[in-house]
Image: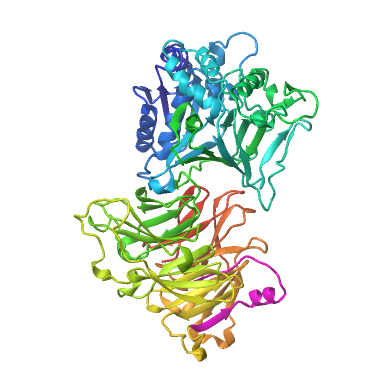
Amino acid sequence: MLLCLYNPTSGDGTAKKLLDEHVLPLLQSNGKSVDKVISTEHPGHAGEILVDFVNQHEAEIVVILASGDGTLNECITGLSSAESTGRSRPPKVSFVLVPSGTANALYSTLFPPPQEGPADTAYRLLSIQSFLANGKTIPLTLAITTLSSPPSARKRPQAKISSVVVSTSLHASILKDSETLRKEMPGLERFKVAAQQNSTKWYKSWVKLIPAPGAEVVQIYDPSSKSFIDHPDSHSNDPIVDLDGPFAYFLSTVNVDRLEPAFMISPLASRIPATEATCDLVIVRPFCSPTVSDDTLETREAFVPVLWKVLGDAYHQGAHVDLRYNENGEATTEGDGPLVVEYIRCGGWEWIPVDDDEDAHWLCTDGAISKIETEGRAVCSAAVPDAGVGFMNSSEIYVIATAKTDDSADLVALGTDHSVQVLQVAENSIKSIASFHIGSRITALAFSPRTVSPSASDDWFIELTAASANFGLHLLTKQPTNNETVFAFGGGLSGHHGRVNDMTFCGGKGVDSTRYVATVSDDKMLMVWDLYPTQDVSSSRASPESTGMSSPPPRAQPTAYVMAFPHPLTSVCSHPSSSKEFLVSDTTGSVFVTDWRSDPDDEADYDSWRLVELIEPYALAATSMGISVPGGWASWRADNADIVGAVYNSRYSLWNISQLQGGKPTTGNSFPQGLGGHRFRWSSTYPEYFAISTQSPAKGALINIHNTAYTQPTTLTLAPRPHFVRDFDWLASRTPRIAAAVGRTLVIVPVAVDA
């Protein structure tokens, strides 16, 4: 399918003329039939047009786009935020650019303009000519920027998608002020005027630099070797780099080496191409100069020539990246003084502006200006979209949980850097139905059996628990007539003092299954929490007439029953047949069946809650020899509480508790030695099947599907290296499917089984 889309107001307004007189006749003469020609009519319209077109067609779509970079951003933003409908795999979308905007950064990078003389019509048709010649397509890297409010605000983060530039400091201020000059100065001159207006501003912020997955450390350009080297403050055991302000310039690009045809601000994007999704950062910090020791108006005015030297040299084939300070604080290409420009290559970054510096709160994403809230932050990271994704989230997905009851079988919860999102997964579509802002990275999730999906009832109800990186626990609820509510508990001295690795609601079919939730942690504790210590659970759900609120009404804090173990704990599992037992695994490969309701007060019965301890032989040998391998994970088979499965390193073990015969399990290898298994989960609807994932990126994002009747697994490859599966779970649907987290992507994978 061929869609021709143009923006009549881009640049000097010649997009339609160029299409009518050159592009469309050229396509027609080469046998290319255009299915639709559409003009944009308002901001955001390009994305709306493209999403509608995608939803109406199954075949691959090629978009002839006559516009600037801003309209391309509208298209990408529309595709990224659109709700998936009608198919499990959307069609591939490719863009053929016809440069008609002001700067045309992406086009100028792909097709560098002639150095002498203005670009003519022939130059503007190079992408069309490449398309007609079946030239190769280049996958776009997306910069996904999340704007977060302070945790106390309880607001959903905003996500901004960019394909060219994300910036703060001078560049964002220039873009903001240039908009007021657009009518009187439609060309590039308005940017130079805005630059003069902001030349003496410095921007106070804290910055964190995060390495790309394949690089492991942050990289910085070294002018002496003309290559990227490891940043001196980034190490494999502590890779994140902290930068202090103030900043004069802070700009991040993807896909491009320039922002105008001659303004090569990030030239190394093309000279030294990255091998994975990365951001190229150009940073100027005045205090790197040997002559700057304080922040005064005089100092700022004296620094302006350095800033103009940087921006001026960007117009000379990106020569600014080689600038160094001499002893007088002048920018020069001679000597070995401090770097004027810190040219960084990384996987992402975090910008935390100082509250009282209003100018530091402005953010530019492909020309669109946003403001970071007071006490807020912006987090940007690079990603390559996958045409087969089920759902792309705005930030990294760390934890996945699926609901297991018949009334909630289509629900999936995602735990991210700062929030929990609940999705409804239909056969061919995914819909977001709730989002809970926590303000800290999520480490564990569990759905309550009380949860009812919108597909099962108009009076639906969402309830789940979450653990965060600050060791806090949260009860999350949502009804159709109420806002999301977050009830925090388990903090301080009464809760865990280490990372919470897993959680589960109590088993059984009675009221207890919704009242008690178990958590396990690196602090070697299993805690069973009574969520309603002074309340009747059957009447605790809010009435439909209740008013929406950001937090629930006052309620009693949950109380905990605590059991200590000898080693850090990795997983906890309940079984639908019993409310008394939990299955717990630790980092040494031991698996415990525990009766948490037993009374350990009598000294003789101190370990009475440990009914059975199962030990994988390889794990026992490794522990006794002092060999450190990845910790284990255990799970109960849904239809039989006597069957326990676990993974430890690359091996899995299956025990039948009713026939232990000395405790030796049935064992097998799931992954080659060295990859290491991470999660072990039984299917709840096809109980003879279990799946194991690995967090090693060596072979890409892999999940092995095992059938207890066969020796060899079936391998699902969800993404190539260096991607890996952070977490996964089985959907409780009649058609067996797995929900897996790969980076920012939720991948829904059907699993072929012999029914």
**Residue at position x 69%, y 44% in the image:** 233
Q: Which residues are magenta?
A: 610-635
Q: Quadrant of residue 488?
A: bottom left
Q: Is residue 255 visible?
A: no
Seen from the viewer's position, the closer of residues 201 and 469 is 201
Residue 679 against residue 384 in the figure, above or below: below
Is residue 707 found left or right of 627 in the rendered image?
A: left
List x then y, in percent, for residue 132: 53, 23
List x then y, in percent, for residue 159: 44, 39
Seen from the viewer's position, the closer of residues 319 and 5 is 319
Q: Quadrant of residue 383?
A: top right
Q: Name the image quarter holding the C terminus.
A: bottom left
| Residue farthest along the right direction in this orientation | 335
Q: Is residue 194 magenta?
A: no
List x then y, in percent, for residue 500: 50, 64
**Residue at position x 59%, y 25% in the image:** 110
Q: Is residue 622 magenta?
A: yes
Q: Is residue 643 visible?
A: yes
